[in-house]
Image (cartoon, rainbow, N blue to C red):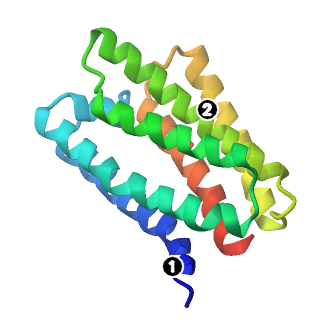
Amino acid sequence: MNPIETYKHLCAAAAVLLVVALLFLVWKWPQGKHMTFSQHAAAHRSAMLYYFLIFTAVLPLLLLFFLGWFVRAFQLPGAFTISIVLAVCFQYSVTIIPEVGGWKTRYHVTGASISALAMLTALLILLVAPTVNGIGKSVTLLSVAAMVVLLYIGAINKIKHTHLLFLQASYYIAFFAAILTVTYAG
């Protein structure tokens, strides 16, 4: 097998690792369903370190997947790569700067928003890519619609909601559902 082809499976591995690690975070350091994953982590010093380590492990796997296989396999434009790199960089930066008040909270919310918008942009580019069709295109369309609705709910509630954790998890699930469907069925 081509070594580059092994990168294809890194997204699935990263998604599983992320789900298990974030479930453990919420179980070990519970803060309530009205708080994001990062707000759960920000409540305890050990949780902040754990959160940082999660993304230190997951984000390089995702970059290898996207830049080493996905972009090539689907012949995606540079704008897709830029969107993914922006999403990853801002996601990593917000794990370094936790939501603990003052300028750090302002930066964290802004950086997380940029990351979320970059993820949506990547899916919009994927949606119009001529190399993606069938079920991959359909799931990407549904994911984009779900992400837009979730962003709208977040915006009208000023990122405060009784089920903020569920909304955040749903956003990431929509993103990974599209990417994994395109990878394995598209």
Q: Position of residue 122 (x, y in %)?
A: 67, 45
Q: Residue at x 87, y 59 (%)?
A: 130
Residue that protrudes farthest toward the top in the picture: 102
Q: Is residue 57 left or right of residue 155?
A: left
Residue at image coords 29%, 27% = 97
Q: Secondary structure at mark 2?
A: helix
- Front label number (1 vs 2): 1
In terms of image quadrants, where is residue 179?
A: bottom right
Nearest to the observer: residue 32 or residue 112? 112
Where in the figure is residue 87, as x and y percent of width and height?
53, 39
Q: Is residue 48 left or right of residue 82?
A: left
Return the residue at label 2.
117
Circle 1: is it few (<14), some (14-19), or many (20+) Cα within 10 Å? few
Answer yes or no: is residue 182 visible: no
Residue 142 is situated, as x and y percent measured from the top left of the image, at 74, 49
Q: Circle 1 sits on which residue?
A: 6
